């Protein structure tokens, strides 16, 4: 945890470093670093600052700097480490995205076995639990910690001499798989923590890796956009992530970790500190929280009667839908650690804790048939058509079954009675099929061997679990590709919905992206539902699309694994989309947040003749494949001739967005503060630029509100 003074210090240091970068134009060669000792100082500062922002962002959910500024600091640190390899260390934030791949995970024993908790499903069980604890301990009053049960993947972390030394999955409770590189990609887990302050040499901590519901939705949206199948729920996504081979992909999933239990803690002489120095579970959680871990401290209550526990569990049963994370129940544990030994454990469960599970939101219905949908890049998704059933406020009649493995693992058949589950506001999915109620007339779901749209033989890649149609001309894929191309996040062509595209394809007018720019408007105006007015609008929308920022085009091209965010990041690296045609695979691999699979996909896309031809054709049609120039006076507008600089955090838009806006209106963006700057726009927590600007004649210091008026 950071004190208010420390937070202020880090804000100041951040601004100092950013300004240093501003004035040095981000390049190490041009920067003032000449010796390794100067570099060492800068590296230390950068790491402290990045760890600080990681903590604020991932643990405190507070962003102090823009993503853009964060990336600049991160890239600068990376470039210094690359130039001075002697300065690279394992606990550097740049190592959170581990290089290289681990092919398999070694199995290692937990220091203390991870027993599973006894489950209860009704209030009587909780009252009973309280009574048993009091009987066994011969105490009249016992304090319990009561907290939400996070629904993710269980982990155990070991810190030695204040450093994260290894991380394991729960495994079978005795042995877990070592997944340390993946855990380093979880940014809310600090690689260093000051346990020695408490006299701890070695400590084992338990917790749960979990994806916040909002981020899970966003992640699924990105996956869908990148042409991949969606994941069933946040729990699967989190626990699946732990065992992935690609740490960069783990980082993309925006995992969080909630730590809620210390299972082992010894001092340098090997003395057990639990129960002696550390007496209460609630104090342990507070300590973890103070050391910078994300804990359930805000949700945790200390209660001492069965009735109070029942009430608090009920309160959460209602609140769970609006909570940041998916939870599947509550956990009740004895607060006094000395009591753990007195109460002991059965062969399966500790007697000092119990889990109270919420009833899942489920409904039973019948699986009527299965349709196979062909995605934009040919991925075949089985979709279950159900007898409509009400579930958590919506009617469910169609759910994705994701892929062949899902269908086989759950042994789902057509005609089966199935249990549909909906976790929070996440998409519903089939949790199981009820084998007992089978009549014998159910039929096994056979996956097609050939594309339902074009008849091409399907292939299945080993790691994807999905069957694909590899025919680029496949009508279903062409349709999905064009729908994606015109969609809001891509080219955003208003007035061109899926229905119109379907019609244009059927009329034989379009079969490729360039066709969208040579539509037969005369013929369209004769179609039912298209008046001359709507054709005029369509013409304008298509003309406007040609001028849009090239990241939209890049995203719209629908490269496998490339979602909107990746497309934006990619365009940061080049001036023109076609520059990527000259990039090597290594260069794609070296990009921050691009894993090997993604790099391979982008590389293959840009090194195909088809792509080269497509880009040439789009350019000749007049599409922008290059970013608007930073200098020069191509754009005329009301900010022409004006130079802008931003400092601090803007409240209504990101800095890149604001800069884009200025350039759209003909203005320019300054690289650093000088007398040439006309306007310094000041956001929250600005650096020392404001003071400097006031000393420069001609520089007007304006607020974000004033800026918004200027661009309105
Ligand atoms: Zn096909």
Image (spheres, rainbow, N blue to C red):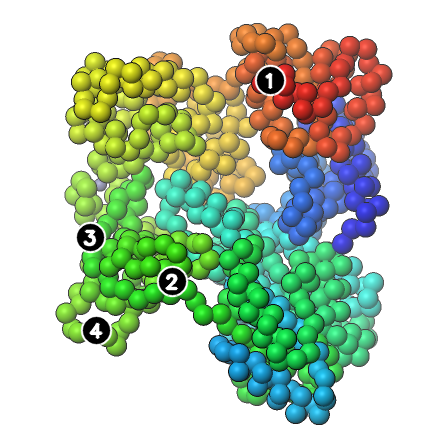
Q: Can you say which quadrant of the picture contains the N terminus? A: bottom right
- The answer to which image quadrant residue 428 occupies is bottom left
The residue drawn where x is 43% and y is 54% is 426
x and y percentages locating residue 258 in the rendered image? 62, 61
Q: CA distance from mark 3 to mark 1?
A: 55 Å
Q: Are marks 4 and 3 in contact (CB under 8 Å)?
A: no
The location of residue 560, given as percent across then percent down, is 38, 39
Give the CA separation, mark 2 to mark 4.
20 Å
- Residue depicted at 72% across the width and 60% down the height: 289
Quadrant holding ligand 1? top left
**Side of 241 relative to 9 (left or right):** left
Q: Nearer the viewer, residue 342 or 514?
A: 342
Q: Looking at the picture, how far across and down is residue 157, in whole percent?
A: 64, 65
Q: Nearer the viewer, mark 4 or mark 1?
A: 1
Find residue 283 and report its image quarter.
bottom right
Query: Do the CB atoms of the residues marked 4 and 1 lie less than 8 Å apart?
Result: no
- First along the sequence among labels 2 and 1: 2
**Label whose residue precedes the other's in the sequence (3 or 1):** 3
Marks 3,1: beta carbons within 8 A: no
Location of mark 1 (residue) = 711
| Among the two numbered marks 2 and 4 on one chain, the one whose residue lies closer to the N terminus | 2
Secondary structure under tag 4 reads loop
- Asked if residue 353 lies left or right of residue 690, the reply is left
- For label 3, the residue is 448
Q: Which residue is mark 4?
A: 438
Please tell me how crowded label 1 is: few (under 14), some (14-19), or many (20+) other residues with Cα within 10 Å. few
């Amino acid at each position: 945890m950071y004190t208010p003074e420390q937070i202020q210090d880090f804000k100041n240091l951040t601004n100092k470093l950013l300004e240093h970068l501003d004035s040095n134009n981000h390049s190490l060669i041009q920067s003032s670093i000449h010796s390794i000792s100067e570099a060492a100082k800068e590296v230390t500062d950068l790491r402290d600052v990045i760890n600080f922002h990681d903590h604020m962002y991932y643990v405190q959910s507070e962003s102090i700097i823009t993503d853009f500024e964060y990336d600049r600091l991160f890239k600068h640190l990376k470039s210094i480490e690359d130039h001075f390899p002697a300065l690279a260390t394992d606990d550097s934030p740049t190592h959170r995205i581990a290089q290289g791949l681990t092919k398999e995970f070694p199995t290692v024993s937990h220091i203390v076995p991870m027993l599973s908790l006894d489950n209860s499903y009704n209030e009587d069980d909780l009252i009973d639990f309280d009574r048993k604890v009091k009987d066994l301990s011969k105490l009249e009053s016992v304090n319990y910690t009561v907290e939400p049960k996070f629904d993710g993947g269980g982990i155990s972390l070991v810190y030695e001499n204040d450093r994260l030394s290894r991380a394991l999955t729960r495994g079978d409770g005795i042995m877990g798989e070592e997944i340390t590189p993946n855990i380093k990609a979880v940014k809310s887990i600090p690689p260093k923590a000051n346990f020695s302050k408490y006299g701890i040499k070695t400590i084992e901590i338990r917790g749960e890796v979990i994806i916040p519901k909002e981020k899970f939705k966003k992640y699924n949206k990105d996956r869908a956009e990148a042409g991949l199948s969606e994941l069933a729920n946040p729990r699967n996504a989190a626990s699946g992530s732990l065992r992935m081979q690609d740490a960069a992909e783990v980082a993309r999933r925006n995992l969080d970790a909630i730590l809620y239990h210390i299972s082992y803690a010894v001092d340098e002489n090997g003395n057990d500190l639990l129960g002696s120095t550390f007496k209460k579970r609630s104090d342990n959680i507070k300590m973890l929280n103070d050391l910078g871990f994300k804990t359930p401290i805000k949700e945790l209550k200390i209660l001492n009667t069965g009735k109070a526990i029942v009430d608090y569990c009920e309160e959460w049963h209602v609140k769970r839908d609006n909570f940041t994370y998916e939870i599947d129940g509550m956990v009740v544990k004895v607060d006094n650690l000395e009591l753990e030994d007195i109460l002991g454990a059965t062969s399966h469960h500790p007697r000092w804790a119990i889990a109270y599970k919420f009833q899942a939101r489920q409904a039973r219905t019948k699986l009527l048939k299965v349709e196979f949908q062909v995605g934009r890049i040919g991925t075949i998704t089985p979709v279950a058509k159900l007898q409509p059933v009400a579930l958590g406020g919506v009617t469910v009649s169609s759910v994705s079954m994701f892929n062949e493995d899902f269908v086989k693992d759950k042994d789902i058949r057509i005609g089966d009675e199935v249990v549909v589950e909906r976790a929070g506001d996440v998409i519903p999915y089939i949790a199981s099929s009820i084998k007992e109620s089978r009549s014998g007339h159910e039929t096994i779901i056979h996956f097609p061997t050939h594309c339902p749209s074009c008849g091409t033989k399907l292939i299945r890649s080993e790691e994807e679990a999905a069957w694909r149609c590899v025919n680029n001309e496949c009508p279903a894929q062409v349709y999905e590709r064009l729908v994606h191309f015109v969609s809001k996040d891509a080219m955003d062509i208003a007035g061109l919905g899926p229905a119109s595209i379907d019609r244009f394809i059927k009329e034989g007018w379009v079969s490729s992206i360039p066709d969208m720019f040579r539509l037969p408007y005369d013929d369209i105006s004769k179609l039912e539902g298209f008046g001359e007015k709507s054709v005029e609008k369509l013409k304008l929308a298509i003309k406007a699309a040609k001028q849009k920022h090239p990241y939209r085009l890049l995203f719209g091209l629908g490269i496998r694994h490339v979602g909107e965010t990746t497309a934006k990041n990619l365009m940061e690296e080049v001036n023109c989309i076609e520059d990527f045609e000259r990039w090597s695979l290594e260069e794609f691999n070296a990009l921050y947040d691009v894993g090997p699979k993604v790099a391979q996909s982008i590389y293959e896309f840009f090194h195909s003749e088809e792509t080269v031809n497509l880009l040439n054709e789009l350019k000749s049609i007049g599409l922008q494949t290059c970013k608007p120039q930073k200098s020069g006076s191509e754009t005329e507008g009301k900010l022409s001739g004006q130079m802008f600089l931003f400092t601090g955090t803007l409240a209504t838009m990101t800095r890149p967005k604001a800069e884009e806006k200025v350039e759209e209106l003909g203005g320019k963006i300054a690289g650093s503060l000088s007398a040439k700057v006309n306007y310094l726009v000041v956001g929250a927590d600005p650096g020392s630029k404001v003071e400097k600007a006031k000393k420069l004649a001609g520089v007007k210091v304006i607020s974000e509100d004033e800026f918004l008026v200027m661009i309105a």
